[in-house]
Image (cartoon, helix red, strand yellow):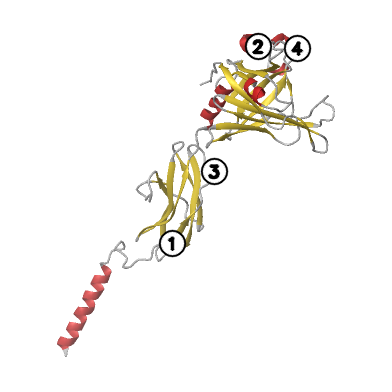
């Protein structure tokens, strides 16, 4: 009987000793990993984007880290680039940074416990082209002499006539290092090049959010600057405070990536048509391509009826290119 009791005590001692020596980091048998989904990608720029995830089940272990991982190849893992986000709510937002422009990326949300790492569904996106470089490209395309001769020669629209359009950079030494450039714009009928019907200065800008837009200014004593596109130094004694803003007539530009051209439009009905009978406001649409541009001005009555302008845009072929000087 004493031998049986001694044997039982030995078994119990071995069991207690084994339990006491078990390590906290021993593998979990048949672990239940977290279940999560990857959020849609948003706020995509040339070098960053927002993503994130949502945890629908935390599994049977505490989550130690979570975030998103990404790569230029499918099925990214935490050995790829990744974020480490706070462990508060079940949903989280991650910022991907240091990305390359115009590049396709694959992203998955992840959650890690002592038992391992689980991943959400994979999503992909492509970063934008750097807006600053696009901005300079647009300006270089705008600088030149253009003619609607070919369009006027092949259309039956009475509004489409032979027009010369010139745009050239002025004040290249001003606002150095900023995303602001100035262009002189002159338009005249081909039959009377010394009597332009439009002389303006455009202030073309790129704001902090990557938006491209312009402001249009009238010039004091415009005859002083006739053919100024051939001699930009004639504007050296003119300062911006002497210009008169054509309020509401600015264009906002976007880049059409598939067509590789820029689109500019006025917004709202704020470009007033002072002195034009029966016309309350004017809208302008433009496209800028590497070898040509289009321009479409239309006038509307106070009740919103289209009362002036051609049925389709003018097409201006580029016949001469002027040098555009970009600041560093």
Give the side of residue 207 with respect to residue 34, left or right: right
Q: Name the secondary structure under disc 4.
A: loop
Describe the element under mark 3 as helix, strand or loop.
Answer: loop
The reply, left or right, for residue 143 in relation to residue 12 is right
From the image, tell me which residue sits under label 3: 43
The disc, 2 or 3, on the residue closer to the chain's N-terminal end is 3
Residue 97: give x, y in percent of width and height. Answer: 46, 40
Residue bearing the label numbered 2? 228
Viewer-nearest of labels 4 and 3? 4
- Badge 3: how crowded within 10 Å, few (<14), some, or many (20+)? few
Toward the right, the furthest residue is 277
| Front position among marks 2 and 4 | 2
Q: At numbered mark 2, what does the secondary structure look like: helix, strand or loop? A: helix
Q: Which of marks 2 and 3 is in front?
A: 2
What residue is shown at x 27% (from left), y 67% (from top)? 22
* Mark 2 touches mark 3? (CB < 8 Å): no
Say what secondary structure mark 1 lies in: strand
The answer to which of marks 3 and 1 sits earlier in the sequence is: 1
Q: Nearer the viewer, residue 186 or 32?
A: 186
Label located before the other in sequence (2 or 4): 4
Residue beneath the point at 17% across and 87% down: 4
Residue at 65% from the left image edge and 25% from the top image edge = 154
Label 1: which residue?
35
């Amino acid at each position: 009987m004493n031998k049986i009791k001694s044997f039982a005590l030995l078994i119990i001692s071995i069991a207690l000793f084994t339990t006491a020596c078990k390590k906290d980091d021993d593998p979990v048998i048949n672990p239940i990993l977290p279940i999560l989904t990857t959020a849609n990608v948003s706020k995509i720029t040339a070098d960053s984007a927002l993503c994130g995830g949502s945890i629908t089940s935390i599994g049977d272990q505490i989550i130690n880290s979570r975030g998103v991982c990404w790569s230029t190849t499918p099925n990214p893992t935490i050995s790829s680039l990744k974020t480490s986000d706070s462990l508060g709510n079940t949903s989280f937002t991650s910022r991907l940074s240091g990305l390359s422009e115009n590049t396709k990326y694959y992203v998955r949300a992840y959650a890690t416990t002592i038992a391992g790492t689980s991943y959400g569904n994979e999503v992909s996106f492509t970063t934008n082209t750097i807006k600053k470089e696009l901005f300079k490209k647009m300006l270089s395309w705008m600088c030149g002499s253009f003619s609607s001769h070919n369009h006027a020669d092949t259309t039956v629209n009475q509004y489409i006539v032979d027009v010369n359009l010139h745009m050239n950079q002025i004040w290249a030494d001003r606002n150095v290092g900023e995303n602001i450039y100035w262009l002189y714009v002159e338009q005249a009928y081909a039959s009377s090049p010394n009597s332009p019907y439009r002389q303006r200065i455009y202030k073309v800008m790129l704001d902090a959010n990557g938006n491209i837009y312009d402001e249009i200014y009238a010039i004091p004593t415009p005859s002083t600057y006739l053919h100024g596109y051939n001699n930009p130094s004639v504007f050296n004694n003119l300062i911006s405070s002497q210009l008169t803003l054509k309020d509401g007539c600015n264009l906002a530009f976007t880049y059409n990536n598939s067509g590789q051209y820029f689109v500019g439009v006025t917004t709202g009905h704020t470009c007033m048509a002072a002195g034009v009978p029966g016309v309350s406001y004017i809208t302008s649409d433009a496209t800028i391509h590497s070898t040509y541009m289009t321009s479409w001005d239309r006038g509307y009555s106070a009740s919103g009826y289209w009362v002036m302008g051609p049925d389709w845009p003018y097409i201006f072929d580029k016949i001469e290119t002027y040098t555009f000087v970009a600041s560093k």
